[in-house]
Image: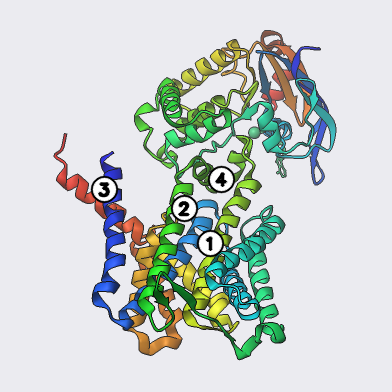
Amino acid sequence: MVDSVLRVDGIQKSFGGLRAVNDVSFSASRGELLGLIGPNGAGKTTIFNMVSGIYRTDSGQIFFDGTDITNRHPTRIARWGIARTFQVPRTFNNMTLEENIRVALLQVNIVDAEATRQACAVLDEVGLYAKRHQNASELSGGERQLLQFVRAAVTRPRLMMLDEPFAGSSPGAIDCMVERTVALSRSGVTCLVISHDIVSLPRVCERVVVLLDGAVLTQGKLEDVREDPKVIEAYLGE
Amino acid sequence: MLASRWKYAGFSLVLLFLAAVPAVANNNYLTAVFVSVLLFFILAALFDFMLGYLNIFNFGIGGFMALGAYTSALLAYHYGISPWFGLLAGGCATLLLGLFAGIITLRLRGIYVGLTTLFLAEFVLFALSNLREYTRGAAGLQVSSLPDLFGISFSRSNPLALYYVLFVICVVIYVTLHCVVNSRIGLVFKAIRDDQLGASVLGFNVVRYKLLNFTIASFFIGVVGAFYGNYIGILVPTPQEFGVARTTEILTIAYVGGRGTLWGSLLGAFALIGLQEVFSVVDQWRLVLYGAFLVFVLMVFPRGLAGGCKQLAAWITRQVQPRR
Ligand SMILES: Nc1ncnc2c1ncn2[C@@H]1O[C@H](COP(=O)(O)OP(=O)(O)O)[C@@H](O)[C@H]1O
Ligand SMILES: [Mg+2]
């Protein structure tokens, strides 16, 4: 596992008496598309929050490109090349779509006319070009998913973490998101995709980590995992 | 392009209006009203620069002003330093206070920042009242007037000249704030205002940007405070002058004008100073009047008078433009 971009090693997180994440370990290699699945409350979002530095980990370590990034500040972690989206989309709502992208482009020193050009280009890719002068608050939930996705992607991360990117989106938006995610991983970006249902994932991920009650239930190829009785039980028992 | 040309036309017209009216009228009462308007406008714009662009509540803005005013006045009183230089010195002293306040509070959010700035401001007023040998406390500190420059008298008997000093200060501050807000830095400010967490996971150091905003504003508040001292001629560290009451007035003007627009504060200042002059008999009810007006305006125009103007402009544009 020398070439793993992200390596999570025995991380734990409790909220009061609740063990939200309990001794979770997995890793993802360069350009890999790894799925993180499990029913609601399994601890998926909490893992993202620990990797991106929003929550402190109680114990365990997180390595990114061989560097220990455990409990570093979110700003530092972002600068290292980890970008993410949120389950409930977070966009800059009183700014136009173009401004949302331009502010992200500042991170890679793209400004002025070139920023406008690139912002228009990426908004066009996700079908939001016509709305580029509207405020983000005017978008639908699915459109805001797309916006926060491209906003994260333009910062040229080496690891992209997507929290339920397909939830609440129209079929068109889902297709678009799948296509962009696959393109991102082809270009060498490691992608970690959360999904609470096992159905929408196949087109995206070859390998998945299945979580239940804060612990890793199993991990492996999607076809194998889907046949696993433990996984079937976890989903039927929900 | 057209929109920006309209903006420059509007800006020039307002500038011309503010420059010409007091000179043409040449009436001390009107000049005094215009001084009030500009003072409140620029303070509200500074308040809005912090609140409307970064959600920083500075409830101590009155105390910050006091520090600027006293720094300049004390330097002149004790050490004979020119009040012209005092304008900058007042700014620098307040900048340091802002930096200190920022470092201890800006990691916190919302109400804590407001409370801490308030405590600091109260502390400044407390110190000014109690260091009597140095500041003369409640007895009042005489402020020397601005010395003549280019053969023009800037004494208090020549209010028109003082008005133009303030006018220049306001233009410099406004243009600076406008440039910052429309720069790359301003873009990050707005992102942080909209979603602090979202901005930090993009890699922006939220605290550093807040500190930058807060120090810029503090410096200018100090400059305005120093001018204010020279204008009124005697400084007393009372709460009406520099305490919560003053902060409330400034806040009301910023809200009435419209948050996040800077220029809205000019509308707010004209509206409230105008109202106050009309109802000058009920001076002790001033804050009540302000409150009632604030509620009224925000009910009619939720985004303040500036928001109302934008709606009006959009409506006119729609009427003028033929439908496609
Ligand atoms: N900030 C928090 N405070 C308290 N409990 C939390 C917090 N965040 C998550 N939890 C709890 O941790 C568990 C895992 O949550 P989460 O990671 O959001 O699950 P998932 O994303 O897999 O649906 C849930 O039981 C949830 O209620
Ligand atoms: Mg979740």
Q: Which residue is mark 4?
A: B192
Q: Which residue is mark 3?
A: B6
Please tell me whether mark 3 or mark 1 is closer to you in this view.
Answer: 1
Q: Mark 1 or mark 4, which has the lower sequence index? A: 4
- Pointer 2: residues within 10 angstroms few (<14), some, or many (20+)? few
Q: Mark 3 or mark 1, which has the lower sequence index? A: 3
Q: Quadrant of ligand 2?
A: top right
- Pointer 3: residues within 10 angstroms few (<14), some, or many (20+)? few
B244 lies left or right of A69: left
* Residue A1 percent across, percent down from the top left: 81, 12
Q: Mark 2 or mark 3, which has the lower sequence index? A: 3
C-alpha distance separating marks 3 and 1: 28 Å
Q: Residue at x 61, y 80 (%)?
A: B77
Q: Quadrant of residue B106?
A: bottom right
Q: Are marks 3 and 4 in contact (CB under 8 Å)?
A: no
Q: Are marks 1 and 2 in contact (CB under 8 Å)?
A: yes
Q: Which residue is mark 2?
A: B176
Q: Which residue is mark 1?
A: B220
